[in-house]
Image (tube, grey):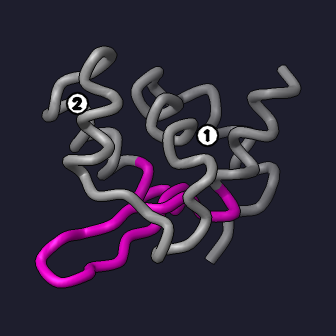
Amino acid sequence: MSLCSNCVLKLIDKLAPNDIYLLHKLQEKITAQLGESRSELYSELKDVMSMFQLQQAIMRMELLGFIGTRKYGKTMHYYITDSGLLVLDILSKK
């Protein structure tokens, strides 16, 4: 399920910087097969956020539908959704 453009526009102002960092990190990961695990994400984002902040950003972005998840074995993989790509597109035009 994808959010409408107006809904996304209203949500963008409420995003935290960590949310945007996470979306940028997942920008090229558009399918579950290309997704990254939490530990892979943390290893690349540890300079800008703690593991707790990363988990908070993951939960917020998943709740809003900006990222998706798929479990492979025991590991959860995260990827960006169409709505998440729309957020990045709108932010790049601001």
Q: Look at 47% across and 74% down and name the residue there.
A: 32
Q: Residue at x 52, y 62 (%)?
A: 65
Q: Position of residue 11 (x, y in %)?
A: 61, 40
On screen, residue 16 above or below 61: above
Residue 34, percent across and down? 50, 67
Element class at badge 2:
helix
Contact check, label 2 and label 1, Cβ < 8 Å: no
56 to 94, vertically: above or below: below
Quadrant of image for the N terminus = bottom right
Disc 2 and disc 1: Cα gap in Å? 19 Å
Q: Residue 29 magenta-drawn? A: no
Q: In the picture provided, is 40 more to the left or to the right than 67?
A: left
- Label located before the other in sequence (2 or 1): 1
Above-or-below relation of 62 to 9: below
Q: Mark 2 sits on what residue?
A: 53
**Image label count:** 2
For the magenta stretch, what is the residue range? 61-83
Quarter of the image where one finds residue 62: bottom left
Q: Quadrant of residue 94?
A: top right
- Please indicate whether residue 62 sits to the left or right of residue 14 in the image: left
